[in-house]
Image: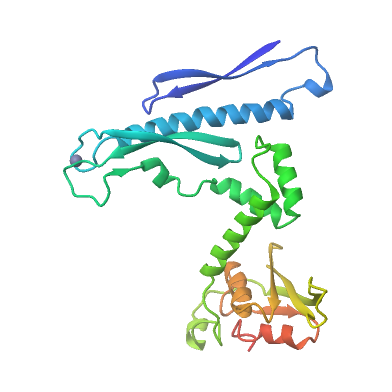
Amino acid sequence: MKFKVQLVIESESGEIQSTQEVAQIEKGNLQPENLGLTLAVAKELLLQTQRSIASQQIAQYQKQQELCSHCDKKLRHKDKRTIIYRTPFGKLQLQSQRLFHCACKEQSTRTFNPLAKLLKERTSPELLYLESKFASLISYGLSSKLLQEVLPIEGEINPTSIRNNLHALGKQLESELPEEAGVLFEGCQRDWEQLPQPDLPLVVGMDGGYVRFYDRASKNSGNFQVIAGKSIKADGTSKCFGMVYGYDTKPQRRIFEVLKSQGMQMNQQVTFLSDGEESIRDLQYYLNPAFV
Ligand SMILES: [Zn+2]
């Protein structure tokens, strides 16, 4: 039996503009292993569909950019260059055209490249998300192998690129974390009394452990303390956090923002579970008015 998979491109009004063949699939006598799509065929199907859809989107976008946004005059082409854009469904090689600015308005440059400007980051947000998600759970090497096993990106990612992307993302998240403050909770007793009835208490478990520095050559290198914790809402959903104590410049802010992202109200109780370790106890103060 033979199957053809086609991509039918329609205009906004529903008219068929073109039909592209994406894949041909042949099936022999039915066996358990050839029922439906195989992983290899599914990956090829995703890759070809991604390329077809993306090329249509790019063509339409570049056509829209060819007209001056001020006077609607058609802009002159200068040249083309190839942009590599990495997605979960394969690497795309996109032809990006450079255009001359219109003479109707003064510009700081003679030419511009609309697609290169639009795709400033050359890795799609979804691929970055997948890389970061798995790299936070397993090693960079295993993350790379796992993603290549299930997605059509063989040879297109490696542990180093995942590590670099994850570090860049970490830096960005770090820069978005507000400053540390002596007292993190907000408002006063009068404000808290006016808040709606809070949810049941948040339960936060925290513990720490000492890790010896990797650089064992130096006897003075000593240990550092890693603190990790989990905050659990009454409905069972939870979030984890972690830090290196003494190195992290915003340890309480980090925990406070996790609790806030779980909807912690200033009139809500928070139950902390930890051992008597002083550094961990200190982190719990001033996060919530119920625990000062
Ligand atoms: Zn113009």
* Colour convention: rainbow
Residue in view at x 74 percent, y 43 percent: 146
Q: Residue furthest front?
A: 217
Residue in view at x 80 percent, y 12 percent: 29
Q: In this rendering, is residue 262 above or below 274?
A: above
Judge by depth and name the residue closer to the eye, 83 or 133.
83
Q: Quadrant of the C terminus?
A: bottom right
Q: Residue furthest top?
A: 1
Quarter of the view holding residue 163: bottom right
Q: In this rendering, is residue 49 above or below 187?
A: above
Residue 269 relative to residue 64: left or right = right
The number of discs equals: 0
Q: Quadrant of the N terminus?
A: top right
Q: Position of residue 210 (x, y in %)?
A: 81, 77
For ligand 1, which image quadrant applies? top left
Quarter of the view holding residue 124: top right
Q: In this rendering, is residue 81 above or below 117?
A: above
Q: Position of residue 70 (x, y in %)?
A: 20, 43
Judge by depth and name the residue closer to the eye, 287 or 86.
86
Residue in view at x 47 percent, y 34 percent: 94
Residue 193 relative to residue 240: left or right = left
Q: Position of residue 192 (x, y in %)?
A: 52, 82
Q: Position of residue 214 (x, y in %)?
A: 79, 70
